[in-house]
Image: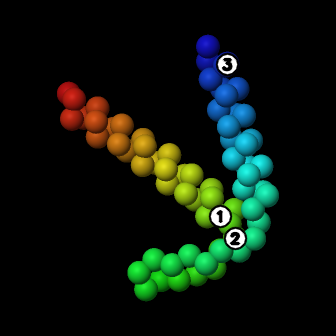
């Protein structure tokens, strides 16, 4: 079962990387008074990493609350 989970995770990572590689153009990013131009690939991967971290943190908080 661990092999299946690893294969699915690897396939998902490949799909994310292909999607990011196909979006190499620049995009303007603004937050409050801060503004910059970054490649879409950094925005996509950064958003993905923040989402993973947020989900992990939420699970940790829920588990702490349940005990």
Q: What kind of element bears circle 1?
A: helix
Residue drawn 70% across and 26% down? 7
Q: Which percent across, then down, holds residue 50?
A: 49, 54
Marks 2 and 1 sit apart, C-alpha to C-alpha, by 6 Å
- For the view shown, which residue lies furthest in the top direction? 1
- Badge 3 or badge 2: first in the primary sequence: 3
Residue 65 in the figure: left or right of residue 5: left
Q: Which residue is mark 1?
A: 42
> Considering the image in quadrants, where does the N terminus appear?
top right
- Which of the two marks, 3 or 1, is nearer to us in this view? 1
Q: Which percent across, then down, holds residue 35?
A: 53, 83
Whether 17 is drawn above or below 30: the answer is above
Q: Quadrant of residue 38?
A: bottom right
Residue drawn 21% across and 35% down? 65
Q: Which percent across, then down, holds residue 4?
A: 66, 19
Whether 60 is drawn above or below 42: the answer is above
Residue drawn 61% across and 78% down? 28
Whether 29 is drawn above or below 52: the answer is below
Q: Which residue is mark 3?
A: 3
Dot label at residue 39: 2
Marks 3 and 2 sit apart, C-alpha to C-alpha, by 34 Å
Q: Count residues near mark 2 (Cα–Cα under 10 Å), then give few for <14, some for 14-19, many for 20+.
A: some
Dot label at residue 14: none
The number of numbered discs placed on residues in the rendered structure image is 3
Residues under numbered marks 2 and 1 in contact, where contact means CB atoms less than 8 Å apart: yes
């Amino acid at each position: 079962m661990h092999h299946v989970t690893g294969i699915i995770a690897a396939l998902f990572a490949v799909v994310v990387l292909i999607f990011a590689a196909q979006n190499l153009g620049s995009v303007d990013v603004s937050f409050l008074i801060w503004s910059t131009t970054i490649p879409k690939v950094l925005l996509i991967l950064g958003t993905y990493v923040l989402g993973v971290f947020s989900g992990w943190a939420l699970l940790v908080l829920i588990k702490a609350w349940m005990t």
